[in-house]
Image: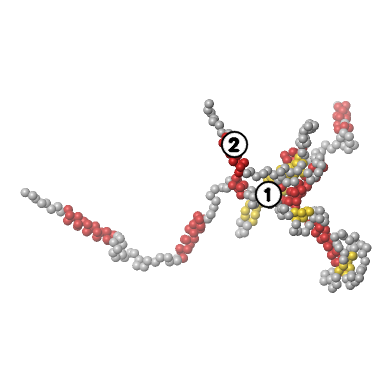
């Protein structure tokens, strides 16, 4: 004789599942997408610039900026430093535009006046200007005529009639050409 | 004791101690040069005296060592000028330094002119243009730390640097510059290195 015994387990299992589901829904309301529980605010505000937030944000931004600044990782060795410092582009180039001045024999650059000759002329000009200052006696006394410089043993000519004469007590220098 | 005192006095009053040989002026027992300052090694190099040369030997070229100490300039910046004039004849070096814009160029030019004059006067060099620069080096002088004021009351420590400059002039024309190393020479060297390999610690 076959006896079918119906186990009460499936009934128990379904009852347990229903109870568990109700429990879960009550504890975690948002998971199942059901109605939100009363303690969550209705309005979700994001990105509001609060005054407290700025002060809090200052310290972390400084720290972050320190983190992102460039800094050397390793000390540069003397070999690497020498390669950079002694590279041909950093060495001084030798100048090939130096010549000899035909007048005095000193060295001069091709595109520049000879330093010695320039100094010589400058000194003579300074002495002539001192003579002019002695003759004028003060500022703003320059006459409205041309000036001629006479050295020792030179006399007036027809061309130098109406001009102001400055006397210099020395021989005419060879480079100061007389008209 | 009286006789001993008189003898002591006479021994002190020895005339040969007073006068240097061959002169009428009395010797001074005071050190006229400051012996407390150390004389540098470069300055001492001028004092070496070679033994006389044998008749068949080629003439030894004259070497003149000169230096200037505690120049108010940086040794790294001075090194560029020293590198410029290395191996040049003295006239070419003076020309280059005259038209250089650097502060150290003026100093090095003075040093070279001094050395040239020393060579002609003391070191028996015939022609002052017949010199070339064999060595020219810079050295670190004494550094001094000072306060450098920044804004807002901040300060940093700066160091005031000084340098030395050393030069060695040798009589004769400057040596020809070395030809640059070609790839062929480098290849030959490499092949020679390979050929020089041997087996070690074997029969």
**Is residue B164 visible from the viewing direction of this image?**
no
Whether residue A142 can be seen here = yes
Quarter of the figure that contains the C terminus of chain A:
bottom right
**Label for residue B22?**
none
The percent position of residue A2, horizontal first and vertical second, equals 8, 49
B24 relative to A119, above or below: above
- Chain hosting mark 1: B
Residue plotted at (40% across, 65% down): A46
Q: Residue at x 21, y 56 (%)?
A: A16
**Earlier along the polypeptide chain: callout 2 or callout 1?**
1
**Image coords of residue A45 (percent x, y):** 39, 66
Front residue (pair B57, B31): B57
Identify the element where label 1 is drawn.
Answer: helix
Q: Residue at x 71, y 43 (%)?
A: B176
Task: Give the number of the mark in front: 2 or 1.
Answer: 2
Spot occupied by residue B38 in the image (x, y as percentages of width and height): 73, 40
Left or right: A41, with A1 as reference point: right
Given residues B12 and B58, the one toward you in this image is B58
Q: Is residue A40 left or right of residue B119?
A: left
The answer to whether marks 2 and 1 sit on the same chain is yes
Out of B148 and A137, give the one closest to the viewer.
Answer: A137
Percent of width and height locating residue B23? 89, 36
**Residue at numbered disc 2:** B192
Q: Chain of mark 2?
A: B
Question: Going by the picture, which residue comes out furthest to the front?
Answer: B184
Give residue B80's mark: 1
When asked about the image quadrant of residue A101, the answer is bottom right
Mark 2 and mark 1 residues within 8 Å of each other at the beta carbon: no
């Amino acid at each position: 004789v076959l006896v079918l015994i119906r186990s009460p387990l499936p009934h128990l299992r379904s009852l347990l599942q229903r109870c568990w589901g109700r429990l879960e829904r009550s504890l975690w309301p948002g998971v199942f997408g059901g109605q939100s529980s009363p303690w969550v605010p209705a309005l979700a505000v994001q990105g509001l610039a609060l005054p407290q937030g700025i002060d809090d944000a200052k310290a972390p931004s400084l720290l972050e900026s320190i983190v992102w600044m460039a800094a050397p990782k390793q000390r540069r060795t003397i070999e690497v430093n020498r390669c950079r410092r002694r590279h041909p582009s950093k060495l001084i180039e030798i100048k090939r535009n130096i010549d000899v001045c035909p007048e005095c024999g000193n060295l001069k650059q091709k595109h520049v006046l000879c330093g010695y000759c320039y100094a010589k002329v400058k000194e003579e000009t300074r002495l002539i200007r001192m003579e002019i200052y002695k003759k004028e006696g003060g500022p703003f006394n320059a006459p409205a005529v041309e000036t001629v410089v006479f050295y020792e043993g030179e006399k007036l000519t027809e061309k130098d009639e109406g001009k102001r004469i400055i006397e210099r007590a020395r021989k005419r220098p060879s480079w100061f050409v007389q008209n | 004791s009286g006789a001993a005192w008189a003898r002591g006095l006479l021994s002190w009053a020895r005339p040969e101690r007073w006068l240097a040989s061959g002169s009428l002026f009395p010797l001074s027992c005071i050190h006229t040069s400051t012996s407390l300052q150390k004389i540098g090694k470069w300055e001492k190099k001028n004092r070496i005296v070679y033994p006389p040369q044998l008749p068949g030997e080629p003439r030894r070229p004259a070497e003149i060592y000169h230096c200037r100490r505690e120049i108010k300039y940086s040794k790294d910046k001075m090194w560029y000028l020293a590198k410029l004039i290395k191996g040049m004849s003295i006239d070419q070096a003076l020309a280059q330094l005259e038209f250089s814009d650097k502060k150290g160029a003026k100093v090095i030019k003075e040093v070279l002119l001094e050395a040239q004059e020393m060579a002609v006067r003391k070191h028996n060099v015939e022609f002052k243009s017949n010199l070339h620069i064999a060595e020219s080096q810079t050295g670190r002088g004494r550094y001094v730390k000072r306060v450098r004021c920044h804004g807002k009351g901040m300060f940093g420590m700066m160091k005031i640097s000084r340098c030395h400059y050393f030069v060695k002039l040798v009589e004769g024309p400057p040596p020809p510059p070395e030809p640059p190393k070609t790839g062929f020479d480098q290849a030959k060297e490499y092949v020679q290195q390979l050929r020089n390999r041997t087996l070690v610690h074997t029969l």
